[in-house]
Image (spheres, rainbow, N blue to C red):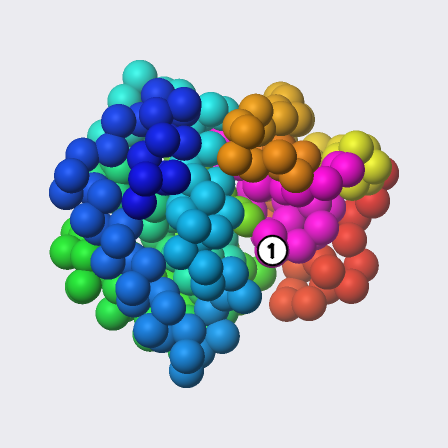
Amino acid sequence: MKKLKSGAEKLGICLTREQLEKFESYYRELIDWNKKVNLTSITDYQDVQVKHFLDSLTIVTAFKPTGWRELRVIDVGTGAGLPGIPLKIVFPGINLTLLEATAKKAKFLEHLIGALGLDRVEIAVGRAEEIVHNIQFREKFDLALSRAVASLPTLVELTLPFCEVGGVCIAQKKGDTEKEVQQAIKAIEVMGGRLREVKSVELAELNDKRCLVIIDKIKLTPPEYPRRPGRPAKRPILS
């Protein structure tokens, strides 16, 4: 995990031996399960370190509370556990919820949590549009994360309702995002958010125009949102 260790240091993160061992185990489990469950197309050892693990840790450049201890975090559409699990390895004190609609991927996550010995991690299986209307999850999180899930206008509707007022939503994006961000301004406003910043990821290891779209939750999301499953993607709220 030399590439991960070196890249993390540039983010101000000094990974311990125990943490590096967990990332090593994470890689092995990911590759093993990927043979039977479609988790990722990126399987090369070096690439996983950089494009999955290090990329997940870039969240720290956008969200630096006084302490990550007991922070309530939800990873929406987590897939193989990214970015939630890498952040949990680095900040074990957070309370993490992994939201995944595919049961097979949820099984992998359940196995992975046990294999890595992680506590205070909950797996929610289902569609974000339905799960967020449950009082247990609605506006209960300090931080909502999402990576490679949907276009930003759709993503805003799926993630911001999870954040409490005063919370933050961070979407990891890649490529030219200017138009996508502008299209999402109305959806952000409707969901009770305000765009704070589009922050470029400045790491030599990640040189494909990655950025973090940072949205503050400033008021409650109207109860009718998000709309029924599939509607945010088919008919996004556009500016």
Residue at position x 66%, y 39% from top? 208
Residue 36, percent from left and from top: 41, 82
Compared to residue 178, the image places residue 125 above or below, namely below
Q: Residue at x 26, y 53 (%)?
A: 24
Boundaries of the magenta span? 148-177
Q: Is residue 89 left or right of residue 182?
A: left
Q: Quadrant of residue 57?
A: top left
Residue 91 in view (yes/no): yes
Question: For mark 1, does the 10 Å Cα neighbourhood hold few (<14), some (14 to 19), or many (20 or more) residues?
Answer: some
Vertical relation: 169 (above or below) 151? above
Q: Is residue 216 visible?
A: no
From the viewer's perspective, is residue 179 above or below residue 123? above
Q: Which residue is mark 1?
A: 149
As helix, strand or loop, the secondary structure at mark 1 comes to loop
Q: Mark 1 is on which residue type?
A: Val
- Residue 77 position in % (x across, y down): 51, 58
> How many numbered discs?
1
Q: Please give the name of the residue rendered at 28% of the width and 50% of the height, measured from the top-left corner.
A: 23
